[in-house]
Amino acid sequence: MAKSFKFRAFTTLLSLWSFLISLVSGIILYFTPQGKVANWTHWTIWGLDKETWGALHINSSLIFFIIILFHIYYNWSVLINYILQKTRATLHRKWELALATLLAIFITLATLYDWQPFATIIKWNEDIKNYWAREAESQPPIPHAEEMMLTEFSKQINVPLEYFEQKMREKGWTLRDSTQTIQDIADQNDISPADFYKGLELTAPSLNSSSRSGQGWGRMTITQASERLGLEPELALRNLRKSGIMAGPASTVRELAMQTQKTPAEIVKLMAEANAKTH
Protein backbone atom coordinates (compact mmCIF):
# COMPACT_ATOMS: atom_id res chain seq x y z
CA MET A 1 0.00 0.00 0.00
CA ALA A 2 1.16 3.52 -0.78
CA LYS A 3 2.46 5.38 2.22
CA SER A 4 0.86 8.69 3.15
CA PHE A 5 2.75 11.92 2.51
CA LYS A 6 4.81 12.93 5.55
CA PHE A 7 5.15 16.68 5.81
CA ARG A 8 7.89 16.49 8.43
CA ALA A 9 9.99 14.24 6.21
CA PHE A 10 9.35 16.63 3.31
CA THR A 11 10.52 19.67 5.30
CA THR A 12 13.61 17.80 6.48
CA LEU A 13 14.64 16.89 2.93
CA LEU A 14 13.81 20.39 1.65
CA SER A 15 15.91 21.96 4.39
CA LEU A 16 18.82 19.70 3.40
CA TRP A 17 18.61 20.74 -0.25
CA SER A 18 18.21 24.42 0.55
CA PHE A 19 21.20 24.25 2.89
CA LEU A 20 23.37 22.62 0.20
CA ILE A 21 22.31 25.19 -2.44
CA SER A 22 23.00 28.02 -0.01
CA LEU A 23 26.40 26.54 0.85
CA VAL A 24 27.50 26.05 -2.77
CA SER A 25 26.21 29.46 -3.92
CA GLY A 26 27.92 31.14 -0.96
CA ILE A 27 31.25 29.56 -1.91
CA ILE A 28 30.79 30.60 -5.56
CA LEU A 29 29.98 34.18 -4.56
CA TYR A 30 33.23 34.34 -2.57
CA PHE A 31 35.18 33.89 -5.81
CA THR A 32 33.10 36.18 -8.05
CA PRO A 33 34.46 39.47 -9.45
CA GLN A 34 33.03 42.87 -8.59
CA GLY A 35 29.56 43.59 -9.92
CA LYS A 36 30.71 46.08 -12.55
CA VAL A 37 33.32 43.61 -13.84
CA ALA A 38 30.93 40.64 -13.77
CA ASN A 39 28.27 42.56 -15.68
CA TRP A 40 30.69 44.03 -18.24
CA THR A 41 32.36 40.69 -19.07
CA HIS A 42 29.19 38.61 -18.59
CA TRP A 43 31.07 36.48 -16.04
CA THR A 44 29.46 33.08 -15.51
CA ILE A 45 30.20 29.78 -13.84
CA TRP A 46 28.23 26.67 -14.78
CA GLY A 47 26.22 28.93 -17.09
CA LEU A 48 24.97 31.21 -14.30
CA ASP A 49 26.00 34.86 -13.85
CA LYS A 50 26.73 36.62 -10.56
CA GLU A 51 23.20 37.99 -10.13
CA THR A 52 21.71 34.52 -10.58
CA TRP A 53 24.09 33.01 -8.03
CA GLY A 54 23.18 35.82 -5.65
CA ALA A 55 19.47 35.17 -6.17
CA LEU A 56 19.99 31.45 -5.56
CA HIS A 57 21.87 32.15 -2.35
CA ILE A 58 19.22 34.54 -1.02
CA ASN A 59 16.24 32.35 -1.92
CA SER A 60 17.76 29.08 -0.70
CA SER A 61 18.79 30.76 2.59
CA LEU A 62 15.27 32.15 2.97
CA ILE A 63 13.70 28.72 2.35
CA PHE A 64 16.11 27.15 4.84
CA PHE A 65 15.12 29.76 7.44
CA ILE A 66 11.39 29.17 6.84
CA ILE A 67 11.82 25.40 7.08
CA ILE A 68 13.64 25.84 10.40
CA LEU A 69 10.64 27.81 11.66
CA PHE A 70 8.35 24.93 10.63
CA HIS A 71 10.61 22.50 12.47
CA ILE A 72 10.45 24.63 15.59
CA TYR A 73 6.65 24.84 15.30
CA TYR A 74 6.10 21.08 14.84
CA ASN A 75 8.67 20.06 17.44
CA TRP A 76 8.19 22.84 19.95
CA SER A 77 7.67 20.71 23.07
CA VAL A 78 10.39 18.24 22.14
CA LEU A 79 12.74 21.10 21.31
CA ILE A 80 12.10 22.92 24.58
CA ASN A 81 12.71 19.77 26.62
CA TYR A 82 15.87 19.05 24.62
CA ILE A 83 17.19 22.60 25.13
CA LEU A 84 16.48 22.49 28.86
CA GLN A 85 18.21 19.13 29.24
CA LYS A 86 21.22 20.25 27.23
CA THR A 87 21.35 23.58 29.08
CA ARG A 88 21.44 21.85 32.45
CA ALA A 89 24.15 19.51 31.19
CA THR A 90 26.10 22.37 29.62
CA LEU A 91 26.06 24.45 32.79
CA HIS A 92 28.07 21.72 34.43
CA ARG A 93 30.61 22.04 31.58
CA LYS A 94 32.00 25.38 32.73
CA TRP A 95 35.28 25.22 30.81
CA GLU A 96 33.58 24.20 27.58
CA LEU A 97 30.95 26.95 28.01
CA ALA A 98 33.59 29.58 28.74
CA LEU A 99 35.72 28.56 25.76
CA ALA A 100 32.76 28.52 23.34
CA THR A 101 31.61 31.94 24.58
CA LEU A 102 35.08 33.45 24.28
CA LEU A 103 35.51 31.99 20.79
CA ALA A 104 32.18 33.46 19.64
CA ILE A 105 33.19 36.87 21.03
CA PHE A 106 36.60 36.61 19.37
CA ILE A 107 35.10 35.77 15.96
CA THR A 108 32.77 38.76 16.21
CA LEU A 109 35.49 41.20 17.28
CA ALA A 110 38.03 39.82 14.81
CA THR A 111 35.59 40.38 11.97
CA LEU A 112 34.71 43.90 13.12
CA TYR A 113 38.31 45.01 13.73
CA ASP A 114 40.11 43.05 10.97
CA TRP A 115 42.01 40.74 13.26
CA GLN A 116 43.74 37.62 12.04
CA PRO A 117 43.00 35.11 10.66
CA PHE A 118 39.70 36.59 9.44
CA ALA A 119 41.38 39.66 7.98
CA THR A 120 43.32 37.33 5.67
CA ILE A 121 40.13 35.61 4.56
CA ILE A 122 38.64 38.97 3.60
CA LYS A 123 41.92 39.99 1.91
CA TRP A 124 41.85 36.82 -0.18
CA ASN A 125 38.37 37.77 -1.31
CA GLU A 126 39.59 41.27 -2.25
CA ASP A 127 42.61 39.81 -4.07
CA ILE A 128 40.31 37.59 -6.12
CA LYS A 129 38.15 40.57 -7.09
CA ASN A 130 41.26 42.62 -7.93
CA TYR A 131 42.50 39.78 -10.12
CA TRP A 132 39.33 39.90 -12.19
CA ALA A 133 39.52 43.71 -12.31
CA ARG A 134 43.09 43.60 -13.67
CA GLU A 135 42.04 41.57 -16.68
CA ALA A 136 42.58 43.66 -19.83
CA GLU A 137 38.97 43.64 -21.02
CA SER A 138 37.28 43.51 -17.64
CA GLN A 139 37.02 47.22 -16.95
CA PRO A 140 34.30 49.22 -18.71
CA PRO A 141 35.38 52.61 -20.08
CA ILE A 142 32.68 54.21 -17.92
CA PRO A 143 31.24 52.83 -14.65
CA HIS A 144 28.05 50.86 -15.35
CA ALA A 145 28.47 51.42 -19.08
CA GLU A 146 26.34 48.36 -19.83
CA GLU A 147 23.31 50.16 -18.37
CA MET A 148 23.66 53.16 -20.71
CA MET A 149 21.66 53.63 -23.89
CA LEU A 150 23.78 53.60 -27.03
CA THR A 151 23.12 57.31 -27.62
CA GLU A 152 24.32 58.19 -24.12
CA PHE A 153 27.31 55.84 -24.35
CA SER A 154 28.27 57.41 -27.68
CA LYS A 155 28.38 60.87 -26.15
CA GLN A 156 30.24 59.76 -23.04
CA ILE A 157 33.15 58.18 -24.91
CA ASN A 158 33.25 60.86 -27.61
CA VAL A 159 32.54 58.55 -30.55
CA PRO A 160 29.90 59.34 -33.19
CA LEU A 161 26.79 57.20 -33.19
CA GLU A 162 27.29 56.49 -36.89
CA TYR A 163 30.59 54.78 -36.06
CA PHE A 164 28.75 52.26 -33.87
CA GLU A 165 26.14 51.61 -36.54
CA GLN A 166 28.73 51.17 -39.29
CA LYS A 167 30.91 48.81 -37.26
CA MET A 168 27.90 46.74 -36.17
CA ARG A 169 26.89 46.29 -39.79
CA GLU A 170 30.42 45.13 -40.59
CA LYS A 171 30.29 42.63 -37.72
CA GLY A 172 26.84 41.41 -38.69
CA TRP A 173 25.39 42.48 -35.35
CA THR A 174 21.81 43.65 -35.08
CA LEU A 175 20.56 46.89 -33.58
CA ARG A 176 16.87 47.66 -33.15
CA ASP A 177 17.37 51.31 -32.29
CA SER A 178 19.92 53.59 -30.66
CA THR A 179 17.92 53.79 -27.39
CA GLN A 180 18.84 50.21 -26.52
CA THR A 181 21.26 49.76 -23.65
CA ILE A 182 24.69 48.26 -24.24
CA GLN A 183 23.60 45.22 -22.21
CA ASP A 184 20.49 44.74 -24.37
CA ILE A 185 22.53 45.02 -27.56
CA ALA A 186 25.07 42.52 -26.24
CA ASP A 187 22.36 40.06 -25.17
CA GLN A 188 20.60 40.45 -28.50
CA ASN A 189 23.81 39.45 -30.30
CA ASP A 190 24.78 36.73 -27.80
CA ILE A 191 27.96 38.48 -26.66
CA SER A 192 29.14 40.27 -23.53
CA PRO A 193 29.28 44.08 -23.26
CA ALA A 194 33.07 43.74 -23.15
CA ASP A 195 33.03 41.77 -26.42
CA PHE A 196 30.77 44.42 -27.93
CA TYR A 197 33.18 47.20 -26.95
CA LYS A 198 36.25 45.24 -28.02
CA GLY A 199 34.69 44.13 -31.30
CA LEU A 200 33.92 47.69 -32.33
CA GLU A 201 37.64 48.49 -32.09
CA LEU A 202 36.93 51.71 -30.25
CA THR A 203 40.41 51.94 -28.78
CA ALA A 204 41.98 52.37 -32.23
CA PRO A 205 39.88 54.97 -34.03
CA SER A 206 38.25 56.71 -31.11
CA LEU A 207 39.23 60.08 -29.72
CA ASN A 208 40.63 58.38 -26.65
CA SER A 209 43.94 57.67 -28.37
CA SER A 210 46.01 59.40 -31.02
CA SER A 211 43.39 62.00 -31.87
CA ARG A 212 43.92 63.66 -28.52
CA SER A 213 47.64 63.87 -28.91
CA GLY A 214 47.47 64.96 -32.54
CA GLN A 215 50.12 62.45 -33.59
CA GLY A 216 49.75 61.18 -37.14
CA TRP A 217 46.66 63.20 -38.06
CA GLY A 218 48.24 66.31 -39.58
CA ARG A 219 49.33 64.77 -42.87
CA MET A 220 46.05 62.95 -43.42
CA THR A 221 43.39 64.20 -45.78
CA ILE A 222 39.82 64.48 -44.54
CA THR A 223 39.04 61.25 -46.39
CA GLN A 224 41.91 59.38 -44.70
CA ALA A 225 41.14 60.78 -41.26
CA SER A 226 37.47 59.90 -41.70
CA GLU A 227 38.34 56.30 -42.52
CA ARG A 228 40.51 56.12 -39.43
CA LEU A 229 37.65 57.45 -37.32
CA GLY A 230 35.21 55.07 -38.94
CA LEU A 231 33.17 57.91 -40.49
CA GLU A 232 31.94 58.57 -43.97
CA PRO A 233 33.92 61.52 -45.43
CA GLU A 234 30.68 63.35 -46.25
CA LEU A 235 29.64 63.12 -42.63
CA ALA A 236 33.01 64.44 -41.40
CA LEU A 237 32.83 67.36 -43.83
CA ARG A 238 29.31 68.17 -42.71
CA ASN A 239 30.45 68.13 -39.09
CA LEU A 240 33.24 70.56 -39.90
CA ARG A 241 30.81 72.88 -41.69
CA LYS A 242 28.66 72.92 -38.56
CA SER A 243 31.69 74.35 -36.77
CA GLY A 244 32.22 76.94 -39.51
CA ILE A 245 35.15 75.16 -41.19
CA MET A 246 34.91 74.78 -44.97
CA ALA A 247 36.94 71.89 -46.37
CA GLY A 248 37.04 69.31 -49.14
CA PRO A 249 37.86 65.58 -49.17
CA ALA A 250 41.47 66.32 -50.22
CA SER A 251 42.05 68.98 -47.56
CA THR A 252 44.62 67.93 -44.98
CA VAL A 253 44.06 68.17 -41.25
CA ARG A 254 47.19 70.32 -40.87
CA GLU A 255 45.98 72.83 -43.49
CA LEU A 256 42.66 73.25 -41.71
CA ALA A 257 44.44 73.56 -38.36
CA MET A 258 46.65 76.37 -39.69
CA GLN A 259 43.69 78.17 -41.29
CA THR A 260 41.61 78.10 -38.13
CA GLN A 261 44.48 78.47 -35.62
CA LYS A 262 43.63 75.11 -34.05
CA THR A 263 45.64 71.98 -33.45
CA PRO A 264 45.22 68.88 -35.66
CA ALA A 265 43.74 67.08 -32.66
CA GLU A 266 41.08 69.79 -32.31
CA ILE A 267 40.17 69.50 -36.01
CA VAL A 268 39.79 65.72 -35.70
CA LYS A 269 37.75 66.16 -32.55
CA LEU A 270 35.38 68.52 -34.37
CA MET A 271 34.98 66.01 -37.20
CA ALA A 272 33.46 63.59 -34.73
CA GLU A 273 32.09 65.64 -31.86
CA ALA A 274 29.92 67.98 -33.88
CA ASN A 275 27.88 65.00 -34.93
CA ALA A 276 27.78 63.46 -31.48
CA LYS A 277 26.28 66.65 -30.02
CA THR A 278 23.26 66.36 -32.32
CA HIS A 279 22.12 63.07 -30.75
Image: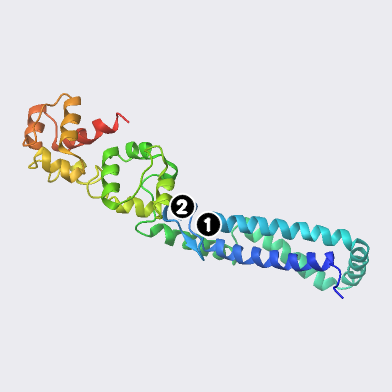
Indicate the colouring scheme: rainbow
User: Is 21 displayed left or right of 224 in the figure?
Assistant: right
User: Is 178 displayed left or right of 14 in the figure?
Assistant: left
Q: In the rendered image, which residue does mark 1 sit on?
A: 50
Residue drawn at the location 16% of the way across and 26% of the way down: 241
Image location (x, y in percent) of residue 109:
67, 58
Image location (x, y in percent) of residue 12:
78, 67
Find the residue positioned furthest to the top.
Answer: 244
Residue drawn at the location 37% of the way across and 36% of the way down: 152
Q: Are marks 2 and 1 in contact (CB under 8 Å)?
A: yes
Q: Which amino acid does label 1 sit on?
A: Lys
Residue drawn at the location 90% of the way across and 72% of the way down: 89
Q: Earlier in the sequence, mark 2 or mark 1?
A: 2
Question: Does residue 143 appear anywhere in the picture?
Answer: no
User: Is 227 displayed left or right of 186 in the figure?
Assistant: left
How many marks the image carries: the answer is 2
Q: In the rendered image, which residue does mark 2 sit on?
A: 39
- Calculate the distance from the C-alpha at mark 2 to the C-alpha at mark 1: 8 Å
Image location (x, y in percent) of residue 220:
9, 42
Residue drawn at the location 58% of the way across and 65% of the way down: 27
